[in-house]
């Protein structure tokens, strides 16, 4: 086989990962959760909402569905580098690059450089993982934290050094802080692995239990801080929402199948799924490898326990992927060894081609919520942006709109009926006309509205004063809707062109 310079394999992997993750890093637009988490981080920096995440006065004024740990980290990232789509994508990508580096270095030592390279390549190319890396989220940091905790556990078994319990406990604690219940998979996986490998005797020592206590102590920093701030009710709501509403009741998920995730894996990553289940063919031989046995137990624990839950989301599987990929790689690494030079050369050529293509033709088209970004472009002509935005008859997906405008403009978004137009024109109080998540005075706000074209024309017909009060800022043909603003927001030289 050909001889390669020392850092050829990791450099190829890192460059490929960077190209695939960040070719569209500066393009505005996220999946709606990306707006939400970025708005939480931005509001932490700008308004001091570090302990309890805050979106707007209308929605999630006190967000309790998740702990604030990742939003705090992203907020600190924004504090140093500024709040933007580019910085938000870099933030989540850094966690993946750390995972890629740690796993490559670890596998190179344990299984050889070829296995480390092949594993890194298939992890980078895993479709559902690449999709998740396009916007800020909690699952990529969680994946890193879970992986580090279980890797420390593996090292303590191999090297028989108690110091690795500290790492296991620390990253168990960060996993709890990132996403609560998912962190509990770590001690579950460790217990099952000790049981299967007949090493439960290790639990007679106090160190594993101190490790468990250390992780819970780290997590307790958050509820203790809430208690000191007089907001312990946030933690009580969190427990109700996370453990009862989601994990137990399944958020009224209705019908579900225990094989939903298996179908998802074959649909979203057929090659990886085939390799994973192919590894069972030589199960007895493969299981003798210590890291394979841990990876398989971790994979099956995630897959089985998640499959038993009523409520299912694809992103729940993210922490499972590093182990899932390795199990599949382990079953074919030796068979592909004769093809090592061709696979390496092909990967290098693919990386060069992708890098060249995106350098010549970078991705710049806005594909997420283009109508709202068209409106924001037009809104640059305004003296100021509306402090409240009405989404008339829910013409636009509410959370995409609310989360985006909270991140971009710190605006509050409300789903409102058409009658709000007339009330605004007549200077009537809006109290009681639509549902509010939190009590606040909507009559003091300056309004803008997204409204269907036909609905607006009907309103104009019945109440001509609407045109005296409001100005059409933009029209979006794809949704057949106007964005209408209070005339007091417009400059005298405003030019409307659509």
Image: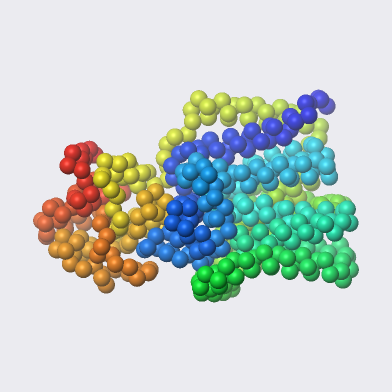
Depicted 320 relative to depicted 199: above or below:
above
Q: Nearer the viewer, residue 213 or 197?
A: 213
Residue 304 falls left or right of residue 201: left
In what quadrant of the picture does the C terminus appear? top left
| Rendered image quadrant of residue 260 | bottom right
- What color scheme is it? rainbow
- Indicate the position of residue 310 as horizontal and vertical percent values: 58, 69
- Indicate the position of residue 269 as horizontal and vertical percent values: 63, 47
Mark yes or no: residue 345 visible. yes
Q: Which residue is at 69% across, 39% downward?
A: 121
Q: Which residue is at 81% across, 62% downward?
A: 193
Q: Which residue is at 59% across, 66% downward?
A: 222
In what quadrant of the picture does the N terminus appear? top right
- Indicate the position of residue 120 as horizontal and vertical percent values: 71, 41
Give the total number of marks visible in the rendering: 0
Q: Which residue is at 80% across, 37% downward?
A: 113
Which residue sits furthest front? 228
| Rendered image quadrant of residue 392 | bottom left
- Indicate the position of residue 266 as horizontal and vertical percent values: 63, 51
Depicted 111 relative to depicted 407: above or below:
above
Q: Nearer the viewer, residue 98 or 350?
A: 98
């Amino acid at each position: 086989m050909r001889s390669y310079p020392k850092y050829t394999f990791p450099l190829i992997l890192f460059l490929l990962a960077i190209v695939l993750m960040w070719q569209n890093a500066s393009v505005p637009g996220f999946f709606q959760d990306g707006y939400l988490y970025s708005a939480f981080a931005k509001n932490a920096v700008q308004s001091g909402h570090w302990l309890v995440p805050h979106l707007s006065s209308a929605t999630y004024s006190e967000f309790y569905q998740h702990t604030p740990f990742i939003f705090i980290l992203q907020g600190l990232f924004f504090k140093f580098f500024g709040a933007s789509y580019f910085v938000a994508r870099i933030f989540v990508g850094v966690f993946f690059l750390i995972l890629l580096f740690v796993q490559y270095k670890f596998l190179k030592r344990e299984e050889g450089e070829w296995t480390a390279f092949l594993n890194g390549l298939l992890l980078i190319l895993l479709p559902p993982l690449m999709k998740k890396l396009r916007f800020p989220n909690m699952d990529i940091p969680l994946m890193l934290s879970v992986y580090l905790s279980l890797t420390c556990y593996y090292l303590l078994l191999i090297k028989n050094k108690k110091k690795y319990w500290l790492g296991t406990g620390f990253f168990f604690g960060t996993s709890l802080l990132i996403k609560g219940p998912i962190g509990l998979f770590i001690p579950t996986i460790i217990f099952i692995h000790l049981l299967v490998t007949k090493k439960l005797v290790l639990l007679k020592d106090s160190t594993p239990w101190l490790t468990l206590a250390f992780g819970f102590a780290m997590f307790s920093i958050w509820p203790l801080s809430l208690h000191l701030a007089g907001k312990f009710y946030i933690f009580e709501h969190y427990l109700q929402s996370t453990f009862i509403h989601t994990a137990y009741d399944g958020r009224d998920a209705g019908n579900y199948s225990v094989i939903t995730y298996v179908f998802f894996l074959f649909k979203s990553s057929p090659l990886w799924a085939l390799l994973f289940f192919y590894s069972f063919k030589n199960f007895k031989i493969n299981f003798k490898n210590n890291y394979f046995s841990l990876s398989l137990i971790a994979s099956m624990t995630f897959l089985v326990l998640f499959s038993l839950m009523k409520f299912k989301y694809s992103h729940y599987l993210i922490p499972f992927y590093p182990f899932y990929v390795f199990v599949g790689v382990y079953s074919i690494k030796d068979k592909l060894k004769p093809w090592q030079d061709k696979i390496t050369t092909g990967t290098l050529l693919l990386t060069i081609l992708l890098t060249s293509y995106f350098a010549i033709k970078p991705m710049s088209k806005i594909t997420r919520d283009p109508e709202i970004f068209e409106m924001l472009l037009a809104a640059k002509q305004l003296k100021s942006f509306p402090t409240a935005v009405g989404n008339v008859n829910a013409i636009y997906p509410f959370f995409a709109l609310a989360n985006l405008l909270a991140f971009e403009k710190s605006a509050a978004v409300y789903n409102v009926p058409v009658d709000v137009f007339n009330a605004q024109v007549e200077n009537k109080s809006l109290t009681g006309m639509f549902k509010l998540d939190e009590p606040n005075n909507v009559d003091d706000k300056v309004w803008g509205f997204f409204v269907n074209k036909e609905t607006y024309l009907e309103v104009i017909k019945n109440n001509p004063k609407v045109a005296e009060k409001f100005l059409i800022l933009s029209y979006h043909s794809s949704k057949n809707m106007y964005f209408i603003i209070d005339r007091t927001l417009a400059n005298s030289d405003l030019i409307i062109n659509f």
